[in-house]
Each structure stands twice: as structure tokens, then as C-alpha cells.
Amino acid sequence: MKIRNLIIALGITAFSCAPPKDELQITVSPDVINPGYIGNGVEWDPYDEAEAWGSSLSDEDWQKLFKRLDFMRMGYVRCMINSPFRYYDAKTGSYDKTRNIESISRVLKYCTDNHITVMYGEYNPPAWDMKTDQKWVDMSVDYLDYLVNRLGFSCIEYFVLFNEPDGSWACTNGDYELWKSMLLRFHAKMKAYPGLSDKVKLAAPDAVMDFKNPVSAYDAAGWIKQTANEVDSIVGVYDLHAYPGQHEVRSGRYADILARHKAFVPKDKKIVLGEAGYKYWRAADSLLMKEYNRRAEGHPFTKGSDSNMLVYDYFYGLDMPLLCMEVMNSGYSGIAAWMLDDAMHSQGDSGKPEDIKLWGMWNILGEEVFHDSSQEEIRPWYYTWALMYRYFPNGTNILKTSLDRNQGVYAVTGEYKGKYVFAAVNITEKDKKLTLSLPVELSRVSKYVYEENQRKENEYGHPVPAGTGLRMDKEYKTTLKAHSFILFTNID
């Protein structure tokens, strides 16, 4: 079965209880349901393993990246390091904050220059037996101070330690009390550096939704609840990781899951998805998983053990903005897609390119390391994800958008400095005639369209409007094609 036909079949299953209608009323209220949105973005880690793979990024590679990122205008980036590739020499046990500083400096300078909020942190301590070692605390915080106060990378606003500490794959192995004790020790050390704890707040708990470590006392909701109850005073932002299934999100159920976790976050704090993407292990996505496994078998540079083999497909450019819409409408303040670039990680961060984590919008080292220049090309989901960054900037207010969620159309509306953006996805096999009721009339509107056989782009692969200079009255009619995305905005 072709992948498009497979997706259509799954879509029919998702909405079999209520046959989709061809016409749909969407009402946008001036009521703000989610103020001061931080922004949408990606996981952009600083190519820790590139040198181990035998090819650091050339200046040409960096400029190609920056050209693509310039269009995206990201609001939020999560940037994580592995210290043995940075400040810690595993052979000697020595600390050198200037070691391999170039690539992380290029990432953080770009984010600083472009006013991007960065959540920075460490996946693990330099060695697992150092997870409670004061030496790690001292080195890590000194390195953080070096980046922020010495090198001036003011983009770093949040610090996270222990990637996914609830996980059985983490050195903490779900030990909440150990994690909490280290959080307190890191906070105390940060306060010892003048001004550091004022500039950089802790992000926590970085737990994984829809996962429960059998040896942990809590699931992800429990980690949020305990963090809020016990250490909220030192937490600047709450964050979770989310890897739902396609059916789970397309069925409309995911909004309830997001709300259940957010319920434990104090009213004066924000929550973001520090990592987000799709995984297909659930029974409802079995056909997608079968295709995933077929592609992973015998692949030249990934075994698919931690990848998404379907990021090459058109439909992923519908699923990612759909997830983003659910996040924004559920009161979360940001989402970072896992991940920007295949060239960032191997499985287990082994330094070997035989089993990379293939999740990105491209692989910037496709030619140099993997001998396949086609991997450097932009993949379809960049098109819609870039639009969701660019036109929901930091500070956007998310407005209440009402529609029949059983009809296979999802939408979100934002207001930014008196200007507006409206985006919608149709995941059904039928075109939809939309009637939009807007709080204000809009002029000089640009319209972007993502359809399988129509998505205008320029010579660099950046989205180009399908129409410009449009006027939208308070009641506006348009058509949203089957399996497509549309975005209207008068934001420059």
C-alpha cells in the first residue's frame, strides 16, 4: 500500500464515528487563552559527534544552515551537550572550558543575535558514576557561566540537567529523589556565580509523557506534581517530552492528555515541550510501524533504533503543525521538534555514524560523512514547521478558536502586536469549505498553502505565499483541500 493511501485509510478509521462534513464554521474570539507564547522551534544540538565522524561542519555548511534558519525565525531552541565531547576529557579526567568550543559557539551566537530563547543543558554527567559527584556540578556550572557571562551568550535563559531523568535509559533510572537533590545542588552552585542565577533559571523535570518507569515512584504527571510541590521556587519553566502516535493526535484525544499534565503546573509558571515528535509503536499505528521497519532494514546509516523513518513523507508536514496547534491551544508556551538535523547524534552518542538518529529536516553532513548529498536537501515538513515558527513569534497571544473537532480539521489563531495569524490542517480525504468568523477585518494578508502537489517555494526551498495583499472581512470563506495545511497572516 502506498504511504498516502495508508494515511487516508487511517484517517477514515479515526473519524468513522462521525462522518466528516464538507462545510465547517470556525469562530475566532478576541479572548486570549494562552498569553505570551515563548515560541516554536527545534532541538538544535551543537554537532558534538561531527569531529568523531571525521568531518566538522564547514563554513559552507554553517551558511547553508543559517540561510534556512533565517526564514524560520525560531522563537525557542533546546540545545543539549555531551560533556565528553566538550569540556571534559574522558581520557585524563581534566576540565577545559575552551575544548571544542567552536561549534557550540556558532549555535549560541546565532541564537543570541536572533533573540531566540534557548533551553541549554547536559544529557548526562561525563560518566554515569559521576551522577552525584560534586566535581560534575562544579565543572558544569562553571561551563554554563563561561557561556553566559564570559562569552556573552545571553540567549541561554533555562538550564536542564539529566535528559529524561524518569527514563530507564537515564543514569538516574527514574530516581526522583536523586534528581531533586542534584537540582538543588546545581541551583546552589549557580547562585555562587555573580548574576548567573538571575540570568538563567532551571527547567524541570524534563520527563517523558506516556511513559512510566517500573522502578520509579511517578509517571510524567507525577514528576510534574512533585516538582511543583517541592521545588517550584527554583524552577523557571516546566518542561516535558512528548512522542505521541499519529492516531492518538489525529483522533483529537491528545488535547486531554496535554491538559492532564499541565494541571499540576503552578498558575504563575509556563510549560513547554522540550522535545516532541511522533513514534508509531502503538497498535493504532501498526501499518505505519510496518513501513517504518521496512525502511530501517538494511539502511546504510541507521538501524532505525531511535529514528523516524517517515520524516521524508509529505504527511509528516501535516502531523507536526497539528501537534503544535494542540500544544498552543492547550496552554503550553512552546514546542521544540526533535530534531533539526540528522547530523547531530548517533544512537547512544557512540561517535560512530553507523546508526544515527534520523529525525531531522535534513542531514547537513549527508555528502561529507554519509556519501549521499540528497540527504542535505530540505524535507517536506520544513515547509509547515518553518511557518509555525515564523508567524507565531515570541510574545504571541493565542486566541480562542472554536470549531467542531470531530470533522478532521484543526486550527489555531494568534495575535501579535495587533496583527494576526490563522493556521489550519485538514487530515480528511475531503476538501473543506471553511467559513471563518474573525474578531477584526484584516488587510495585506499573505496566504500559504501546503498541498502535496502545490507548495510554492523559492530557490532556497523557503515557503512562498500562494497569495499576497489579500483582504479578510470579519466573515471570510475559503477552501481547505483534503490532506493539506493553510496559513493566513498579516504579520511581516
Image: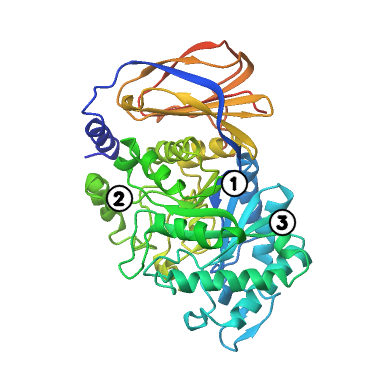
Q: Earlier in the sequence, mark 3 or mark 1?
A: 3
Q: Are marks 1 and 2 in contact (CB under 8 Å)?
A: no
Residue 324 vertical position relative to residue 131 in the rendered view, above or below: above
- Location of residue 56 (image quadrant): bottom right
Label 3 to label 2, Cα distance in Å? 36 Å
Q: Secondary structure at mark 1?
A: loop
Tag shown at residue 391: none
Image coordinates of residue 150 in percent, x first then y, are 78, 67
In the image, what residue occupies the spot 61% across and 50% down? 65
At label 3, which amino acid type do we have? Answer: Lys
Q: Earlier in the sequence, mark 1 or mark 2?
A: 1
Image coordinates of residue 97 in percent, x first then y, are 69, 75
Q: Which residue is mark 3?
A: 109
Crowd rating for badge 1 (residues with CA inside 10 Å; few <14, some 14–19, many 20+): few
Q: Residue furthest front?
A: 229
- Location of residue 441 (image quadrant): top right
Q: Is residue 83 visible?
A: yes
Q: Nearer the viewer, residue 366 or 70?
A: 70
Closer to viewer: mark 1 or mark 2: 1
In the image, what residue occupies the spot 39% across and 63% down? 301
Give the mark count. 3
Q: Which residue is mark 1?
A: 268
Crowd rating for badge 3 (residues with CA inside 10 Å; few <14, some 14–19, many 20+): some
Which quarter of the rendering shows the N terminus? top left
Q: Which residue is mark 2?
A: 280
Horizontal side, residue 225 vs residue 86: left or right: left
